[in-house]
């Protein structure tokens, strides 16, 4: 295991991924890894390197007509008996190998070794992606130093099976409340059962037809689902309140207000309270920088089902894509891994794109 203050960028992408995995960096505890990333990139003459908390930003300033941003988060979820790394055949196992230290290794090597890219590049290695949004290092930069995030295209190295995932769904969570009247369960006719009334909420969910929206040639499937229910007072009391928690994953052609309006319409007549919401991100494949990247990589883009930090760039008017090694379904699992072949493939294709005339 390497010392936390040293990353060997000459060791290759597989060995570098292993080094990154072996430096613990659970959310809010990324300082050692941020130190190592900063120390590894600071000597590069072609980069200007800045540290903002536990976020490291490295930029070229070659006067190119186009600037791209390549980013990845340094933090992981808590360990689950999956440290240190283990290399088994063509798979590298370990905490964060998939989400997303493999992608960070690719970006680090690009930053260190591509000294004359045909596009100016901003590399962002940020903290606290796996926790509440108010701690997110990328959002902190957007709030405090938006100039550092200016780009014609952003590529997040989130695991995407080495394919291109464009845009992302928005997410809305609401609580739908039914009201009743308490009574002794032996004399239930004197009350009104709020849990029974929730059957209508569930019925509306069952009959709702999820929308399929085609945006820039990609089909985003929506989903409106109950994800929780709570109610009840005691074993002999008719309940006077029941709350159904509903999650709406909406296509990125809607904004949050439109999503709220749709959910309110579905549950007209019930109390609906918004718990949290985050806008989606349009794929932006009609933008020249994004189209050029897709053509260079040679992958057919897929829609992103889920929410990622690409939405933060969309809010800034910057098209953003997910492109990184690893299967996103393995993220946060005890047995997560990243295929060696995908590490090498992502590195080669991004290097070729950054150096293409």
Image (spheres, grey):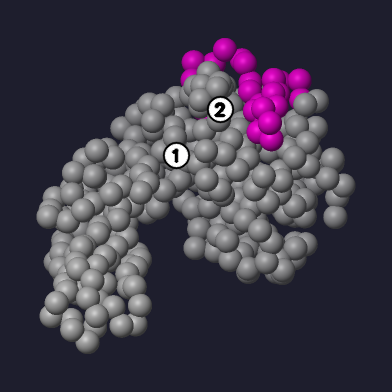
Above or below for 211 versus 141: below
User: Can you identify the residue that label 2 sits on?
Assistant: 141
Residue occupying image coordinates x 61% and y 47%: 103
| Magenta span | 44-72
Q: Which mark is residue 220?
A: none
Left/right of residue 240 with respect to residue 291 in the rendered view? left
Q: In which quarter of the image is residue 259?
A: top left
- Residue 347 horizontal/vertical position (percent): 61, 44
Residue 209 location (% of width, % of height): 16, 61
Check disc 2 and report its element: helix, strand or loop: helix
Q: Distance between the residues labelled 1 and 2?
A: 14 Å
Q: Residues within 10 Å of mark 1 (few under 14, many from 20)?
A: many
- 296 left or right of 342 in image: left
For the point 30% across and 53% down, which residue is it?
Answer: 174
Q: Residue 261 appears at what percent x and percent y?
A: 18, 44
Question: In screen coordinates, is 249 left or right of 60?
Answer: left
Task: Please tell me whether residue 10 belongs to the stretch shown in magenta.
Answer: no
* Residue lying at the far right of the rendered structure: 3
Q: Residue furthest bottom?
A: 186
Q: Which of 155 and 63 is in front in this view?
A: 155
Tell me residue 183's x, y (percent).
22, 76
Image-quadrant location for residue 140: top right
Q: In the drawing, what numbered circle is on residue 310?
A: 1
Specify whether 191 is left or right of 88.
left
Q: Determine whether the residue tagged by mark 1 lies in a helix, strand or loop.
A: helix
Counting every numbered tag in the picture gives 2
Between residues 299 and 333, which one lies in front from this camera angle? 333
Q: Is residue 54 above or below residue 305?
A: above
């Amino acid at each position: 295991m390497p010392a936390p203050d040293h990353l060997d960028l000459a060791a290759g992408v597989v060995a570098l991924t292993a080094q990154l995995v072996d430096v613990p960096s659970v959310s809010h505890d990324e300082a050692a890894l941020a130190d190592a990333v900063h120390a590894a990139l600071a000597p590069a003459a072609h980069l200007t390197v800045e540290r903002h908390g536990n976020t490291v930003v490295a930029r070229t300033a070659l006067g190119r007509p186009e600037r791209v941003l390549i980013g990845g988060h340094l933090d992981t979820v808590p360990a689950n008996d999956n440290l240190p790394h283990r290399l088994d055949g063509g798979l590298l196992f370990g905490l964060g190998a998939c989400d997303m230290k493999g992608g960070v290794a690719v970006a680090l090597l690009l930053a260190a070794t591509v000294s004359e890219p045909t596009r100016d590049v901003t590399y962002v290695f940020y903290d606290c992606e796996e926790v509440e949004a108010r701690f997110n290092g990328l959002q902190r930069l957007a709030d405090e130093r938006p100039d550092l995030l200016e780009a014609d295209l952003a590529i997040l190295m989130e695991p995407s099976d080495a394919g291109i995932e464009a845009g992302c769904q928005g997410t809305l969570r609401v609580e739908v409340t039914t009201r009743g009247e308490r009574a002794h369960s032996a004399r239930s006719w004197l009350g009104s059962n709020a849990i029974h009334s929730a059957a209508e909420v569930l019925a509306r969910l069952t009959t709702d037809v999820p929308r399929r929206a085609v945006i820039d040639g990609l089909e985003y499937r929506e989903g409106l689902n109950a994800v929780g229910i709570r109610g009840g007072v005691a074993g002999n009391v008719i309940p006077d309140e029941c709350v159904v928690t509903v999650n709406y994953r909406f296509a990125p052609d809607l904004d949050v207000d439109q999503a709220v309006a749709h959910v309110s319409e579905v549950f007209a007549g019930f109390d609906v309270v918004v718990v949290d919401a985050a806008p989606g991100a349009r794929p932006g494949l009609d933008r020249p920088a994004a189209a050029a990247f897709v053509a260079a990589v040679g992958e057919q883009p897929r829609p992103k089902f889920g929410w990622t930090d690409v939405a933060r760039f969309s809010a800034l008017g910057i098209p953003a894509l997910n492109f990184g090694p690893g299967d996103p379904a393995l993220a946060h699992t005890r047995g997560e891994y990243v295929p060696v072949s995908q590490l090498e493939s992502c590195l080669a294709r991004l290097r070729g794109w950054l150096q293409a005339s």
